[in-house]
Amino acid sequence: MKDLSKIYTPYKLFLISMICALLVLYPEITWIPYELGKLPEEKKMGYVLFFAFRYIFYSLLILFLIRINLDKIKTLSFSKRLGYNALISISAFAVYGIISFLIYSKIRHFGSLILFQFSIICTLSTVLGYIFVLYQEQREKEQEIEKLKLEKLQSRYDALTNQINPHFFFNSLNGLTSLIRKKDDSITLTYVSKLSDVFRYILQSDKKGLVTLGEELEFVDAFRFMMEVRFANKLEYNIEVEKEALSYKIPVLSILPLLDNIVVHNIIDSDHKMVVSIGLNDKDELIVSNPIYPKLSKPTTNGTGLKNLENRFSLLMNKQIRYENKENIFNVYLPLK
């Protein structure tokens, strides 16, 4: 448990103690004009000074009890806490009696009222200390629950990120093999550089949650080069995003599954040239669109692409993606932050 005296400053605790002392002495405060009216002039100052002494003594006692309750008494049992405070209050009562007798011997300083006030101070300090400790316990439990929730969300997100289908890695390596066979050194070197950028971004993605749209589109640019080389000008990407929108946030690797799905589910050849469009609408959503050229045989996939993406947007942004098939154009709408 944290030291609550570090959370509640000495100034605040002293202010609380003074207010509590006022509450304890409030009935007597209302009697002061009446008591002073009965006393001769030579005793009025002594009465006021004695009352001020009691107020200061009560304030310091309450402050001491509260600090003891916060710093030293660790038990959550109210009865044990009350017992500790009672021992301290009895000792304080004895000290009060000695001091008041020695300094103000001519003034009434003992009686049932004083004993009752010390009992109130003991009970009040116990209740305050108990409330403070319970409050801190509740805060720690809530923080622990929140921590567990975050850890659970992170675990779910990591699991979702790890589900991203890695088959495009093998396709990319096949594309590199093809370039090497063609002995086109210039394109091959550029391809290797872009492939390195793609690998680096994906391998570092587990350390990221949200990235800027600019970062994500830089990755798409590297991936685009690889795909355009692989499909020999049968696949093109049309990216139109204004500079002002590049600072928007988006879950890392959000666009990759969509681009990968386009290749997996569609015929791409001379008769079916694929043009992928990426842009923003007036709702600040990123739209990824492509014509639909369905393959004759259904491709073998794990079916987690869009579902994975939906889950990651839900976890990281508490938003939902949208997709639609409109006039043989497949559109996916990704909300931005």
Image: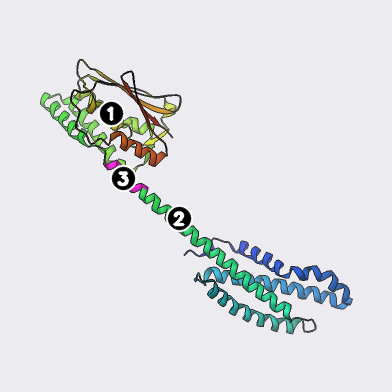
Q: Which residues are magenta?
A: 153-163
- In the rendered image, residue 161 lying in the magenta stretch gets the answer yes
Tell me the residue that label 1 is attached to.
Answer: 259
User: Residue 6: x percent and y percent?
Assistant: 53, 62
Measure the alpha-carbon separation of dots 2 and 3: 22 Å
User: Residue 211: x percent and y percent?
Assistant: 37, 37
Residue 88 disc label: none
Residue kind at label 2, given as amino acid type? Gln
Q: Are marks 1 and 3 in contact (CB under 8 Å)?
A: no
User: Residue 316: x percent and y percent?
Assistant: 39, 41
Please tell me how crowded label 1 is: few (under 14), some (14-19), or many (20+) other residues with Cα within 10 Å. Answer: some
User: Residue 173: x percent and y percent?
Assistant: 17, 32
- For label 1, the SS is helix
Q: Residue at x 62, y 77 (%)?
A: 89
Q: Is residue 210 above or below residue 184?
A: below
Tell me the residue that label 3 is attached to.
Answer: 158
Q: Is residue 275 above or below residue 213?
A: above
Measure the alpha-carbon separation of dots 1 and 2: 40 Å
Q: Quadrant of the C terminus?
A: top left
Is residue 157 shown left or right of residue 80?
A: left
Between 207 and 86, the one nearer to me in the picture:
86
The tag earlier along the polypeptide, 1 or 3, is: 3
The tag earlier along the polypeptide, 1 or 2, is: 2
Tell me the residue that label 2 is attached to.
Answer: 143
